[in-house]
Image (cartoon, rainbow, N blue to C red):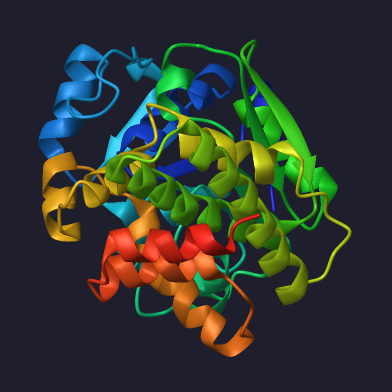
């Protein structure tokens, strides 16, 4: 596995995905690599980026160094000889897109920037890659926040968490992303980092629902504090570790996703609180809110674990059983401390 990050001997890196987070990553990677490969399904988008150096749909203001980017809509032409595969695809589309890979990628290093659960499989992306592509967990890195793509594009100081079973592997991947405005936090808590990123999206949907229903900052603060406690309980009971859930990849990511104007999960939840159906909210946003899919995934995972998760359960019931948002949040409010 070649994780060499010297510009004189750059690893062959392929990014899969063309959304806002994938675009933000291309901004960073192109600064640290001689070339970086980018799988984009839409040929018209590829042509636009080559011509204007911008993504025609996402982060339109971000100027990309197109001269260092090799793009293709043929996924196998990019991943089959890659050293590092970075997956930046919404969980809802992972099965379809990754299912097009025909070569053996079991010995390649895989980086997940997908913060969701694969629908119907009820697996995290790392679990999915291990089960379906035989990628060892030791050959994986999870990238988490707190970090919004929009602020990367604005070159605002941001922190990314890189979690891998091997510290040296996390550090090598971190070097690919580090710039004057991006700092790296290294972790070995792969499980906690990945599931924490999934859970915070569910709680951000819940915070948005509270906002849409008319709850104020006082209640939202208590709601978020209890969401953090629920996250901590889930992580520690399902996979005990010495992790500190007050660190940025857990609490920090939860806070920014629950409060930020850039949070699509909070925006999605706000629409739900205002009376939109999930389908109407998705159509209104024209973007993917991972918390929608994760709410069901965590609900299914927790059938086996049976951990007390009243907030996550309430969000699930609102989204998938059409339970009254008003009543569910009243019930949640009765349990908050």
Q: Splitting the image into 4 quarters, where does residue 173 fall?
A: top right
Q: Splitting the image into 4 quarters, where does residue 242 fall?
A: bottom right
Q: Residue at x 59, y 57 (%)?
A: 336
x then y, percent, for residue 13: 52, 40
Q: Quadrant of the C terminus?
A: bottom right
The residue closer to the viewer here, 324 or 165, is: 324
The mark total stands at: 0
When the figure is inspected, residue 119 is found, relative to residue 112, above or below; the finding is below
Q: Residue at x 83, y 47 (%)?
A: 167
The residue closer to the viewer here, 13 or 251, is: 251
When the figure is inspected, residue 4 is found, relative to residue 135, above or below; the finding is above
When the figure is inspected, residue 313 is found, relative to residue 29, above or below; the finding is below
Q: Residue at x 34, y 72 (%)?
A: 317
Position of 225 with respect to 37 (left or right) is right
x then y, percent, for residue 67: 36, 16
The residue closer to the viewer here, 212 or 60, is: 212
């Amino acid at each position: 596995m070649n994780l060499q990050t010297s510009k004189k001997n750059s690893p062959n890196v392929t990014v899969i995905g063309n959304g806002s987070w994938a675009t933000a990553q291309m901004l960073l990677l192109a600064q640290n690599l001689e070339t970086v490969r980018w799988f984009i399904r839409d040929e018209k988008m590829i042509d636009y980026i080559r011509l204007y150096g911008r993504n025609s749909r996402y982060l339109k203001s971000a100027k990309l160094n197109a001269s260092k980017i090799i793009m293709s809509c043929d996924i196998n032409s990019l991943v089959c000889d890659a050293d590092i595969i970075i997956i930046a695809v919404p969980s809802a589309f992972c099965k379809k897109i990754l299912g097009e890979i025909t070569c053996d990628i079991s010995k390649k290093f895989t980086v997940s920037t997908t913060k969701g659960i694969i629908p119907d499989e009820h697996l995290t992306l790392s679990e999915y890659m291990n089960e379906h592509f035989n990628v060892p967990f030791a050959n994986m890195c999870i990238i988490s926040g707190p970090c919004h793509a929009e602020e990367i594009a604005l070159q605002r100081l941001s922190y990314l968490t890189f979690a891998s079973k091997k510290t040296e592997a996390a550090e090598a991947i971190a070097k690919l992303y580090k710039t004057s405005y991006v700092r790296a936090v290294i972790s070995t808590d792969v499980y906690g980092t990945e599931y924490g990123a999934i859970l915070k999206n569910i709680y951000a949907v819940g915070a948005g629902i509270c906002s849409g229903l008319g709850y104020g900052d006082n209640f939202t603060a208590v709601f978020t504090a209890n969401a953090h406690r629920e996250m901590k309980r889930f992580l520690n009971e399902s996979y005990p570790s010495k992790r500190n859930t007050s660190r940025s990849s857990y609490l920090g990511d939860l806070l920014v996703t629950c409060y930020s104007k850039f949070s699509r999960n909070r925006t999605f939840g706000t629409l739900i609180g205002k009376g939109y159906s999930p389908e109407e909210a998705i159509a209104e946003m024209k973007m993917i809110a991972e918390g929608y899919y994760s709410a069901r995934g965590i609900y299914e995972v927790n059938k086996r674990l049976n951990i007390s998760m009243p907030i996550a359960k309430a969000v699930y019931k609102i989204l998938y059983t059409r339970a009254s948002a008003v009543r569910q949040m009243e019930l949640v409010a009765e349990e908050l401390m």
